[in-house]
Image (cartoon, rainbow, N blue to C red):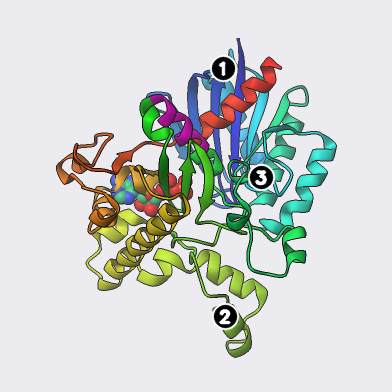
Amino acid sequence: MSHVLTLNAGSSTLKFGLFTAAQDPNPLCTGLIDHIGGAATLSLKDSQDKTLSRGDLAQGSAENHDGALQVALAEIGTQFPEAIITAVGHRVVHGGVDFCDPINVTGKVLEDLDKLVALAPLHQPHNLAGIRSSISAFPQAKQIACFDTAFHRQHPFVNDTYALPREYYDKGVRRYGFHGLSYDYISGKLAEIAPVLHAGRVVVAHLGNGASMCALVKGQSIASTMGFSSLDGIAMGTRTGQLDPGVMLYLMDHEAMTHDEISDLLYKQSGLLGMSGVSNDMRELLASENPQAYEAIDYFCCRIQRELGSLAAAIGGLDALVFTGGIGENAAKIRERVCAGMEWIGIEFDNARNTAGVEVVSTSASRVQVMVVPTNEELVIARAASAAVAG
Ligand code: ADP
């Protein structure tokens, strides 16, 4: 039987998954190599979330993405010696204006994707490094790139542009939106489990370390809180979310900060971490007694409420709100805080359901249904890679 591998290469991480190649791929395992280039670790779990292996890697074995991929492949080879990998699906953060669907990576495609590094300098180079490593490791396999921006490419012009002179739009300065693989998965899942809501107006809140929200009508993305870069919208673990561009001019003029310093501030030192001074991790913030941790959580939730109002306006109302991502799926307190006081929009929250770990966390009478739906970006990639195998 043929198999597909999914790869999601971040700055110091490599997430991977092995699936059967099928229209509905079966997961065999998912893994993570963390701290690439440093004290790297590996964890591998089977489809039931049972740990297959876990531990520190020998020094130097995952010094870069090439090394990390070799470690991942060796581990998969040990655990699943019968696996025959015929396609590798890659998460690629930016597909620019042109890449709207998963694509077979050729030399020309790789060249085009290289040109998009300027649009996502912190993520795209790692994604492309993962593709290059994979081409070396599997020269015979199809390499399929799946884009986080693709799901949003049909946005109406008003949600795709900034009020800059038109020439910048034409040069690609647009509101791209991200987390598209996650929204694609949630949209498909809703069609299965709640077809009436799927046919209506839905806002999905993908709340993880990176966080964004997306407004769907009939399962299609109409607007997103993220824009040109993955900085916009709601506050994140270490990213600012929406920020008055005047702040950046001020930082350059009055704090004499360089491009690299500002980039580091906006992407790595801000958000929940910067506001709290405690952590970027929601679990630690919820457990902290530091008042700044509380303020950071409060800001995070208030901005989600504001964006919910804004996105509902963009789609003419709201039939459902879906929480997903590490925080959205697991942090009952955050869901409760976000939904508190949102009766005006039609939400009647049911906190007993919320803490019981069920799918619907609003009352039966609530006009807007509030749901918790775990995302599965790897499965979206595995489906695309499987489709490529099937031709
Ligand atoms: P990434 O964007 O890196 O994929 P995840 O979707 O894995 O992020 O989400 C990570 C976030 O989810 C962290 O802030 C983490 O604290 C939070 N999280 C995970 N489990 C829980 C939990 N049980 N309660 C509260 N927060 C949680």
Helix, strand or loop at mark 1: loop
Give the residue type at disc 3: Asn
Residue 186 lies within the magenta run: yes
- The residue identified by callout 2 is 246
Badge 3: few (under 14), some or many (20 or more) residues near its Cα, within 10 Å? many
Q: Is residue 293 visible?
A: yes
Badge 2: few (under 14), some or many (20 or more) residues near its Cα, within 10 Å? few
Q: Earlier in the sequence, mark 1 or mark 2?
A: 1
- The residues colored magenta run 184-192
Label annotation for residue 160 = none
Q: Position of residue 183 (x, y in %)?
A: 49, 40
Q: Give me the residue at 71% from left, 41% from top.
A: 99
Q: Position of residue 192 (x, y in %)?
A: 41, 24
Residue 95 appears left or right of 382: right
Looking at the rendered image, the quarter that the C terminus falls into is top right
Residue 361 appears left or right of 319: left
Helix, strand or loop at mark 3: helix
Helix, strand or loop at mark 2: helix
Q: Residue furthest top?
A: 1
Q: Position of residue 109 (x, y in %)?
A: 80, 39
Label annotation for residue 127 = 3
Residue 254 lies within the magenta run: no
Q: Are marks 3 and 2 in contact (CB under 8 Å)?
A: no
Give the residue type at disc 2: Gly
Q: Earlier in the sequence, mark 1 or mark 3?
A: 1
Q: Is residue 121 above or below residue 371?
A: below
Q: Is residue 254 above or below residue 55?
A: below
- The residue identified by callout 1 is 23
Q: Is residue 52 visible?
A: no
